């Protein structure tokens, strides 16, 4: 893989944000990318087309018939695989909850110019593919290899730097997280916008690690310094801070907005009486959800937490509410098996990553 | 169908907009609804999950096994159909381009508070179903019937008024437009968010007419006065103007943004030399695209317009550009067989509907 087709001079597209208001460019990103419809949090598996979508660059067009996955760099036995070969490998199907690392950015102040998610950048699909680790071992990484880069076919610019989207992981990380090489989603071949014909799924980490349109896996003897590895997806307190890499998803919960919506504000209208509040909670690195609490009128109540279906998929929760007439701002917050609880105020970093503050839902009981 | 389950008192959710900047509620709508990825305008049929999506209320959950379409009101032989019966009717598949009437609203000033589309609210699917007219005739509308309402299962509030989403048409309109009762999209059953299990498709009109989650077709002896028919989807010059009903799509064209993007601004980078600019153009009511022009550096050039595949689907166009280094704002505009040409400035109405002004694409040739 080379950059020879894109010998551009860098441009700096400087943009600023306004607190509480959003630019036309931010809205353009929101129109292009798409979030889950929160009422679909009722479903264990997010319906096709309703899973969140965040693509940095344009969706590349790849001919599945000629597409090959290359194992390159410091392998002793490098090889490549066609899609037909990949589809004939031992098959695993696994429900995995993915969340965008930028989810919640709209609530962070001051706000970085990027995709202005509120709560919607999450989804759970049934992913089908084959375990990645045996394929890497088959290529025999050299003794001196420290990690592996995954490069997609999607090319573009960020902060004036042209690059293919690429990320890296160590062998230990891949082993711990049961990384899959994936060709199907919800029982059908990957859709173009979700990485067709081939991507990886990194369970337990934010979505940036699950590289789409996978072209190349390279064995590296030095840590990977690609743009998407070191220039972004880092927790930074200042712009000069080298940062801490973003990896596992922070504990989070979302509520299915109860009742019916007002079209344009999405405030909710609910009848008085018994109603079941329900939703989902998840955490990263395979941690379990231990507790979900619902705040009503300033008091926190424990919801019942269902048994989860899979180590890397979200957990359903429910709470019976006897709703009395009035105006409410409901909140929910989860605690995981590592003892992490969602904060009530957004955590802050320069780029507005991983905001897992408790969701608020505005409800009128009339 | 009754409103007995939703006896809410009206609330007024008043919101204002700021010229050139967007509110958190507008961004929430943009995160929830989703537009086509413009690079997918290369495809005759928009890939599943990439078609634009605009849902006023929550996606209702409908059990296909028990779902029935009712023919009610002033029919002499009212009846109902199960989904199994509908699937066994004579089948038609037809590519239809749908565009949201609110497409382009972000470019209208001053701007109405609603979904802030730029250009993305369009798509072409292969819709499969059965012609609607014979089913209506089978129920024998009474002599006094003037039109028919189509009611979906989706309920919510707009401007304090609770209602199921519903629209109406006359028999003449349905005949002229070859309206379909649709159960499948791109060869698969409708997805929940696109109207599962049953919707109509009204070719040639803006998308609001293609009612999703269809429950009831009612024969009316007076013109329909439902919220979505008379309180919105009207061209109004003042808020008190009763307005002109929005029906056929205005002539429009879009360009596949050439080259590669900058992530956050979506400005484009292109190599100097020969490049093919390409895109789509369409109009309403079955009108053909007669001309597409591309503006480069203040000069307009004629693109070649392909033969269209179907009366109600968009047409591809192409223009060979010998791109010289520099910064460009490209534009495209189409003219249809009725002599309508896209304007260069957004047309204005109170709610920012049907803005078909020429698209601008910012390109650096480096």
Image (spheres, coloured by chain):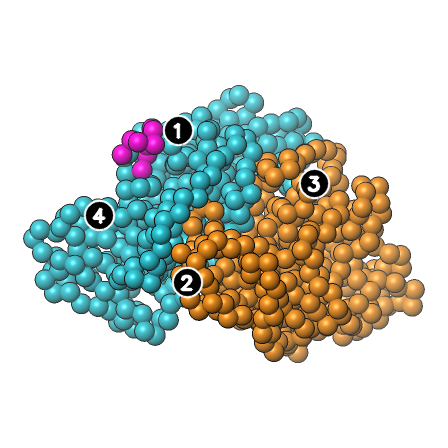
Chain colours: A orange, B cyan
Q: Let me know if marks 1 and 2 both belong to one chain.
A: no
Between the residue at mark 1 and the residue at mark 4, the CA separation in whole angstroms equals: 26 Å
Q: Is label 1 in a helix, a strand or a loop?
A: loop
Relative to B196, say whether A267 is above or below: above
Mark 2 vs 3, N-terminal side = 3
Magenta-tinted stretch: B234-242
Query: Between B76 and A221, which is closer to the camera in this rendering?
Result: B76
Based on the displayed image, in which of its 4 quarters is residue A317 positioned?
A: bottom right
Nearest to the eye among marks 3 and 4: give it.
3
Between the residue at mark 1 and the residue at mark 2, the CA separation in whole angstroms equals: 42 Å
Q: Let me know if marks 2 and 4 both belong to one chain.
A: no
Nearest to the eye among marks 2 and 3: give it.
2
Nearest to the eye among marks 1 and 4: give it.
4
Mark 1 vs 4, N-terminal side = 4
Q: Residues within 10 Å of mark 3 (few under 14, many from 20)?
A: some
Number of the label disc, if any, that sits on residue A113: none
Q: Let me know if marks 1 and 4 both belong to one chain.
A: yes
Q: In x, y percent, where is residue B159? A: 38, 44
Q: Is label 4 in a helix, a strand or a loop?
A: loop
| Chain letter for mark 2 | A
Nearest to the eye among marks 2 and 4: give it.
2
Which residue shows up at 33% across the image and 41% down it? B232
Number of the label disc, if any, that sits on residue B348: 1
Number of the label disc, if any, that sits on residue A110: 3
Which residue shows up at 48% across the image and 24% down it? B300
Mark 2 lies on residue: A272
Between the residue at mark 3 and the residue at mark 4, the CA separation in whole angstroms equals: 48 Å
């Amino acid at each position: 893989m080379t950059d020879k087709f894109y010998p551009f001079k860098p441009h700096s597209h400087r943009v600023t944000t306004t607190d509480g208001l959003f630019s036309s460019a931010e809205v353009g990103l929101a129109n292009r990318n798409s979030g889950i419809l929160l009422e679909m949090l009722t479903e264990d598996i997010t319906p096709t087309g309703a899973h969140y979508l965040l693509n940095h660059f344009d969706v590349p067009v790849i001919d599945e018939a000629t597409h090959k996955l290359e194992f390159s760099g410091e392998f002793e036995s490098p090889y490549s695989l066609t899609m037909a070969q990949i589809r004939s490998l031992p098959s695993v199907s696994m429900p995995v909850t993915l969340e965008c690392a930028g989810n919640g950015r709209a609530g962070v102040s001051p706000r970085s110019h990027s995709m202005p998610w509120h709560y919607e950048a999450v989804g759970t699909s049934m992913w089908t593919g084959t375990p990645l680790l045996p394929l890497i071992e088959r290529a025999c990484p050299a003794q001196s290899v420290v990690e592996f880069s995954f490069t997609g076919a999607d090319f573009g610019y960020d902060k004036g730097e042209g690059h293919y989207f690429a990320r890296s992981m160590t062998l230990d990380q891949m082993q711990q997280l049961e990384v899959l090489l994936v060709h199907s989603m919800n029982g059908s071949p990957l859709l173009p916008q979700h990485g067709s014909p081939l991507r990886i799924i990194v369970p337990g980490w934010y979505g940036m690690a699950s590289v789409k349109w996978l072209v190349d896996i390279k064995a590296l003897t030095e840590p990977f310094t690609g743009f998407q590895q070191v220039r972004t997806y880092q927790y930074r307190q200042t712009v000069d801070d080298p940062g801490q890499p973003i990896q596992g998803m922070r504990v989070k919960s979302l509520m299915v907005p109860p009742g019916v919506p007002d079209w344009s504000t999405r405030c909710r209208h609910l009848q008085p009486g018994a109603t079941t509040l329900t939703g989902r909670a998840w955490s990263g690195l395979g941690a379990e959800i231990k507790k979900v609490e619902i705040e009503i009128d300033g008091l926190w109540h424990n919801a019942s937490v269902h048994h989860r279906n899979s180590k890397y998929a979200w957990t359903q929760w429910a709470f019976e509410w006897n709703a009395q007439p009035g105006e409410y701002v409901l909140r929910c917050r989860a605690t995981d098996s590592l003892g992490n609880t969602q904060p009530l105020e957004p955590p802050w970093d320069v780029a507005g990553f991983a905001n897992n503050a408790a969701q608020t839902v505005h409800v009128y009981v009339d």
